[in-house]
Image: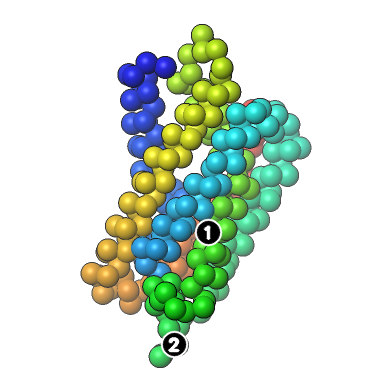
């Protein structure tokens, strides 16, 4: 690949990662509610989930999944159910009582034993949200090959390297979203006071994303 095509790929990938969607919503929600560290862990979990699809697509597993209506349907329903589950957890989360430590103070405390558990949950929720979404696999199958020339000798390796580059850039974009959201939460009192309602709104949106995924058709069919 020449330098011009590589630059086009990087710019296109950055623009796609900057576009608000379920991933950005997940990162921003946790950063607003629990601080920059939680938002960055959320970004890391989402990126790690994308790595699964990149490696699967590079060896052809995602292509087989896209061509199989049964495999697509199974993964689609699993992903939809998980998105709805994450959304319902947000919707049903209770507001901290007076004097009770908030999620932000738990994540920010280096000595609190609940910190590791909270961050681990945030990471794996982000990870499974992407792994169980077949649309992520289809996205990589549709987007990355556009930047691989027909005369490329080792196309799977080229696909893998471009996918890794896309995810690397996406991780930094996600971290940027987390830092920006955490910065805003510290400086806008209204955001802090409405954090619990913000989480409920995000939960409702995740439920909506799950329903939308469940009703979607396989683009390859």
* Residue 100, x across and y down, in percent: 44, 87
- Residue in the picture at 53% in, 47% down: 48
Q: Are marks 2 and 1 in contact (CB under 8 Å)?
A: no
* Residue 178, x across and y down, in percent: 36, 57
Q: Residue furthest right?
A: 70
**Whether residue 192 is visible:** yes
Mark 2, residue position? 100
Which quarter of the image is occupied by the N terminus? Answer: top left
* Residue 195, x across and y down, in percent: 38, 72
Q: 137 or 87: nearer the eye?
A: 137
Q: 120 or 187: nearer the eye?
A: 120
- Residue in the picture at 23% in, 69% down: 187
Mark 1, residue position? 123
- Say which element carries label 1: helix
Mark 2 or mark 1: which is in front?
Answer: 1
Which numbered disc, 2 or 1, marks the residue that appears first in the sequence? 2
Neighbourhood count class around disc 1 (C-alpha, 10 Å): few under 14, some 14–19, many 20 upward = many
Which quarter of the image is occupied by the C terminus? Answer: top right
């Amino acid at each position: 690949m020449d330098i011009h095509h590589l630059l086009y790929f990087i710019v296109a990938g950055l623009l796609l990662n900057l576009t608000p969607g379920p991933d950005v919503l997940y990162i921003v929600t946790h950063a607003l509610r629990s601080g920059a560290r939680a938002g960055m862990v959320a970004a890391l979990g989402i990126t790690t989930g994308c790595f699964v699809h990149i490696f699967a697509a590079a060896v052809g597993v995602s292509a087989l999944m896209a061509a199989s209506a049964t495999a697509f349907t199974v993964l689609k329903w699993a992903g939809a159910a998980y998105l709805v589950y994450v959304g319902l957890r947000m919707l049903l989360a209770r507001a901290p009582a007076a004097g009770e430590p908030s999620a932000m103070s738990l994540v920010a405390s280096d000595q609190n034993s609940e910190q590791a558990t909270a961050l681990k949950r945030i990471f794996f929720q982000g990870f499974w949200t992407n792994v169980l979404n077949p649309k992520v696999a289809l996205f990589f199958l549709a987007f990355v090959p556009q930047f691989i020339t027909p005369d490329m000798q080792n196309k799977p390796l080229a696909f893998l390297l471009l996918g890794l580059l896309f995810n690397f850039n996406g991780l930094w974009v996600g971290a940027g979203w987390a830092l920006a959201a955490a910065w805003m939460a510290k400086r806008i009192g209204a955001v802090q006071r409405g954090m619990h309602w913000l989480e409920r709104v995000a939960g409702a949106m995740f439920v909506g994303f799950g329903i939308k995924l469940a009703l979607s058709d396989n683009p390859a069919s």
